[in-house]
C-alpha cells in the first residue's frame, strides 16, 4: 500500500514530464515570436514616422472597420 501511495503522490509520470517539457518549449517559442513581432512593429512604426508627409502616403485613405461586439 505504501508503494501505491508513493507512486500516486510523489512519483513522476513520464507523460506529465513530457507534457511539461512540451509546454515549456511552446512558451519559449511564443516568447521568441513576441520579441520578433515587437521588433518588426517598432521598425514599421519608425518607417512610418520617418515618411510622414511624403506625397505617396498623403493620398492613402485607410478605412478601418469598427470592431464587432463579442458574442456572449
Image (cartoon, grey):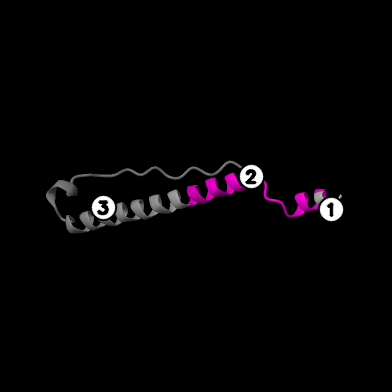
Q: Residue 61 appears in which quarter of the rendering?
A: top left
How far apart, in angstroms, are the residues tagged by discs 2 and 3?
Answer: 45 Å
Q: Mark 1 points at which residue?
A: 2
Does 60 sit left or right of 23 as displayed?
left
Q: Earlier in the sequence, mark 2 or mark 3?
A: 2
Q: Where is residue 13 in the image (x, y as percent from the top left)?
A: 67, 46
Name which residue lies at 43% across and 45% down: 66
How far apart, in angstroms, are the residues tagged by discs 1 and 2?
Answer: 21 Å
Magenta part of the chain:
4-27
Mark 1 neighbour class, 10 Å CA radius: few under 14, some 14 to 19, many 20 or more: few
Q: Where is residue 63 in the image (x, y as percent from the top left)?
A: 32, 43
Q: Name the residue under label 2.
A: 14
The prevailing secondary structure element of the residues shown in magenta is helix
Q: Residue 39 appears in which quarter of the rendering?
A: bottom left
How far apart, in angstroms, are the residues tagged by discs 3 and 1?
Answer: 62 Å
Q: Mark 3 points at which residue?
A: 44
Residue found at the far right of this picture? 1
Q: Is mark 3 on a helix, strand or loop?
A: helix
Q: Position of residue 65 (x, y in %)?
A: 39, 42
Amino acid at each position: 500500500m505504501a508503494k501505491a501511495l508513493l507512486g500516486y503522490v510523489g512519483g513522476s509520470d513520464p507523460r506529465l514530464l513530457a507534457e511539461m517539457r512540451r509546454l515549456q518549449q511552446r512558451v519559449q517559442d511564443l516568447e521568441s515570436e513576441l520579441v520578433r513581432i515587437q521588433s518588426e512593429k517598432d521598425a514599421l512604426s519608425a518607417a512610418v514616422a520617418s515618411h510622414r508627409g511624403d506625397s505617396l502616403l498623403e493620398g492613402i485613405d485607410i478605412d478601418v472597420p469598427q470592431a464587432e461586439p463579442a458574442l456572449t
